[in-house]
Image: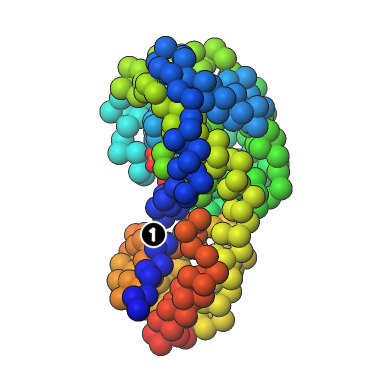
Amino acid sequence: MTVPVVDLRSDTLTRPTREMRAAMVDAEVGDDVYGEDPTVAALEAWVAALLGHEAALFMPTGSMANQVGLRLHAGPGQEVITDHLAHVLRAELGAAAAFSGITTRSWVADRGLLDVDTALAVMVPDGGAYQVSTACVVVENTHNFGGGTVQPLADLRRLREATAAVGVGVHLDGARLWNAHVASGVALADYGACADTVSVCLSKGLGAPVGSLLVADATRIGQARVWRKRLGGGMRQVGMLAAAGLYALDHHLDRLADDHARARRVAEAVALVAPGVVDPATVETNILVLDAAAAGRTGAELATAAAEGGVLGYPMGPRHTRFVWHLDVDDELTDRATDVLTDLLRRRGA
Ligand SMILES: Cc1ncc(COP(=O)(O)O)c(C=O)c1O
């Protein structure tokens, strides 16, 4: 009997379920560049309503939704600021500079947690002829490289008020806003109210094969439509993909709580045998980041050792390894991950 690999490298690895595939096959479609795909239109309307904004635009990827969002706030020679672990800075391959001529500055943030005072201190709303002007602050919720951190609503609100008062925009990278919503109980619309533009992904914990949306007011979404096409993201009979997103929102949103509980359960087990490798209280959603260095290994060494035991993680820098729970990892696979990780860390670290 072959033992299945527990693939916790990312929540992007999910494969569409049989039911999701059936929904895709049956989707009504049209040419979405002409605005004629009814399934895409239904998805856009639903997501915009969930987030309390006027409109939404279906995009192929979260990166494109972020980058088009940033382009709506800032142009060449302007800056966007965010924390040093933000996906838009670290993992979108310099797209803001490469496509939009946008410069960026950042500050060091513990677990990617929003530090409003620092953000406001870094921001330069009107740099005049001497300094780069800040057009936008980006907040990531939940924070991926921060370890699935949920941003406190009170901080998001304070940032929103202070930036709006000086004409600086807020973009929310909400690739995993669904996880924040399920973990915190904060309504999606309350998060939505804290930003001018929001990106959300369907292809992470929600389990759709592809798809993200940019959400904003109708004027901005009109501009976003132009930028999406300009960047080559205008898609045609894409209702089949939107149908996967509709299915995911209908069936896979509430179950994110299971992923959160499983990640926390493993964190608690690891903390028992290797205190210092993880503080379970910091595991708020579906992402578990282990401090491999606290157990005498590099992030890559821990990932390799875990892989030898059939548990795949993602080395995150020299000292950390990330494990992400999702739709395809059930309780049984989680128990296997617990056994492999506690065994490894007990032997070497505890
Ligand atoms: C926080 C965050 N934002 C944006 C993205 C980009 O999504 P995509 O891979 O669809 O471009 C990711 C991908 O993992 C992410 O974690």
Picture residue at 55% right of the left edge, 28% below the top: 43
Picture residue at 43% right of the left edge, 52% below the top: 14
Q: Quadrant of the N terminus?
A: bottom left
Q: Is residue 284 visible?
A: no
Picture residue at 41% right of the left edge, 87% below the top: 347
Mark 1 lies on residue: 9
Q: Nearer the viewer, residue 330 or 82?
A: 330
Picture residue at 50% right of the left edge, 56% below the top: 326
From the viewer's perspective, is residue 130 above or below residue 4?
above
Mark 1, secondary structure of its residue:
loop
Q: Nearer the viewer, residue 140 or 227?
A: 227
Residue 26 is left or right of residue 33, and the answer is right
Horizontal and vertical percent position of residue 143: 51, 48
Query: Does the residue tagged 1 have its C-beta within 8 Å of any atom of ligand 1?
Result: no
Query: In the figure, residue 321 lies in which quadrant?
Result: bottom left
Q: Is residue 4 visible?
A: yes
Horizontal and vertical percent position of residue 327: 50, 55
Kind of residue at badge 1: Arg
Label 1 crowd (10 A; few <14 / some 14-19 / many >=20): many
Which of the four quarters of the rendered structure image does ligand 1 lie in? top left
The colour scheme applied to this rendered structure is rainbow
Query: In the figure, residue 238 lies in which quadrant?
Result: top left
Query: How many labels, in total?
Result: 1
Horizontal and vertical percent position of residue 16: 44, 47
